Image (cartoon, grey):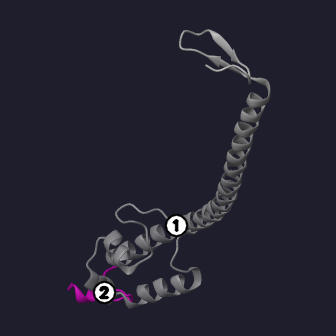
């Protein structure tokens, strides 16, 4: 029996056809073992442990592959979940970024108002000090009161 007589209608041996179909099922099921799990023909032949040339001879199996890809798309269910999660996280990040920008704007406004109030407070204290006299705390901790008429 020659190798050519062992060919199936798939164009490859029965073992190769079985390996390619099993690899295809594992990839579409999202259960990679030897690859990154992406739905590519490179992953198909690697997962089936056959050469690229052998995979290319299995035209009916590649037609099945192409039909599944056309039906399902190139993403596995795991990739679809991941992409959905990434999309949700991007939306959350955008909302948090907007909130952060608003809070930064409010913080700058509050800092400006606080600086203005501090300036007004200092000016009022000086005015009160001039009108009523001032308590000065010396280096030794004793308080001395200065009146408008006394000089230090």
Instruction: State the residue at coordinates (66%, 54%).
Output: 108
Indicate whether 8 appears above or below 32.
Answer: below
In magenta, the rendered stretch is 1-14
Could you say which quadrant of the image residue 60 lies in?
Answer: bottom left
Q: Quadrant of the N terminus?
A: bottom left
Residue 53 position, x and y percent, is: 26, 85
Going by the image, does 58 lie left or right of 92?
A: left
Instruction: State the residue at coordinates (53%, 70%).
Output: 76
Residue nearer the viewer, 124 or 7: 124
Which residue lies under the disc numbered 1?
A: 29
In magenta segment, residue 5: yes
For label 2, count other residues whose C-alpha is less than 10 Å away and answer few (under 14), some (14-19) or many (20+): some
Indicate whether 25 appears above or below 57.
Answer: above
Disc number placed over residue 7 in the picture, else none: 2
Given this view, does label 1 or label 2 mark the residue nearer the observer?
Answer: 1
Residue nearer the viewer, 99 or 20: 99
């Amino acid at each position: 029996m020659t190798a050519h007589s062992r060919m199936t209608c798939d164009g490859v041996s029965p073992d190769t056809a079985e390996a390619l179909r099993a690899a295809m099922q594992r990839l579409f099921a999202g259960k990679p073992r030897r690859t990154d799990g992406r739905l590519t023909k490179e992953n198909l032949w690697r997962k089936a442990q056959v050469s690229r040339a052998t995979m290319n001879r299995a035209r009916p199996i590649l037609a099945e592959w192409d039909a599944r890809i056309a039906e399902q798309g190139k993403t596995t269910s795991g990739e679809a979940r991941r992409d959905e999660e990434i999309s949700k996280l991007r939306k959350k990040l955008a909302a948090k970024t907007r909130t952060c920008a608003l809070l930064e704007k409010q913080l700058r406004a509050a800092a400006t108002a606080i600086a203005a109030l501090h300036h007004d407070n200092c000016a009022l204290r000086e005015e009160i000090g001039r009108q009523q006299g001032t308590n000065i705390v010396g280096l030794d901790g004793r308080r001395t009161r200065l009146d408008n008429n006394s000089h230090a």
